[in-house]
């Protein structure tokens, strides 16, 4: 596994999401999340692994 890049010195964006909003953050991108005003937040991480025909035959 490669060493990750250092986080940027300044935020690239500051976003406010509302109920029902979804934000996609690509793999390897630094991010920080905070829920405010006593609300709850859900952070889900998942990965997809593709298979080729040769993988399936093996």
Image: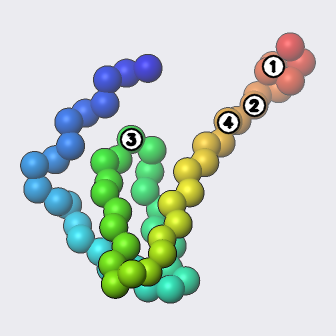
Of the numbered discs 2 and 3, the one sitting upstream in the chain is 3
* First along the sequence among labels 3 and 1: 3
Query: Where on the picture, by quarter, is residue 6?
Result: top left
Q: CA distance from mark 3 to mark 1?
A: 28 Å
Which of the labelled discs sits on residue 30, or is there none?
none
Q: Residue at x 55, y 51 (%)?
A: 45
- Using a 10 Å C-alpha cutoff, classify the residue at mark 1 as few (fewer than 14 neighbours), some (14 to 19) or many (20 or more): few
The residue sitting at 35% across, 47% down in the picture is 29
Q: Residue furthest left?
A: 9
Circle 4 or circle 2, nearest the eye: 4
Calculate the distance from the C-alpha at mark 3 to the C-alpha at mark 4. Answer: 16 Å
Judged by depth in the image, the label closer to the viewer, 3 or 1, is 3
Disc 2 residue crowd, few under 14, some 14–19, many 20+, Cα 10 Å: few
Q: Nearer the viewer, residue 22 or 56?
A: 22
Closer to the chain start, of discs 3 and 4, is 3
The N terminus - image quarter = top left
Closer to viewer: mark 1 or mark 2: 2
| CA separation in Å, label 1 and label 4 | 14 Å
Q: Which residue is mark 2?
A: 51
**How far across and how far down the image is residue 57, in percent?**
89, 18
Query: Mark 1, mark 4: which one is toward the viewer?
Result: 4
- Residue at 51% across, 60% down: 43
Contact check, label 2 and label 3, Cβ < 8 Å: no
Quarter of the figure that contains the C terminus: top right
> Mark 4 = which residue?
49
Name the residue carrying label 3: 28
Q: Is residue 23 above or below residue 57?
A: below
Q: Secondary structure at mark 4?
A: loop
Q: Is residue 32 above or below residue 52?
A: below
Q: Is residue 10 left or right of residue 31?
A: left
Percent position (x, y) of residue 16?
Answer: 33, 79
13 vs 9: above or below: below
């Amino acid at each position: 596994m490669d060493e990750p890049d250092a986080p940027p010195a300044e935020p690239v964006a500051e976003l406010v999401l509302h109920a029902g909003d979804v934000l996609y953050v690509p793999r390897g991108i630094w991010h920080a999340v905070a829920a405010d005003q006593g609300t709850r937040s859900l952070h889900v991480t998942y990965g997809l692994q593709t298979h080729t025909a040769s993988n399936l035959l093996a």
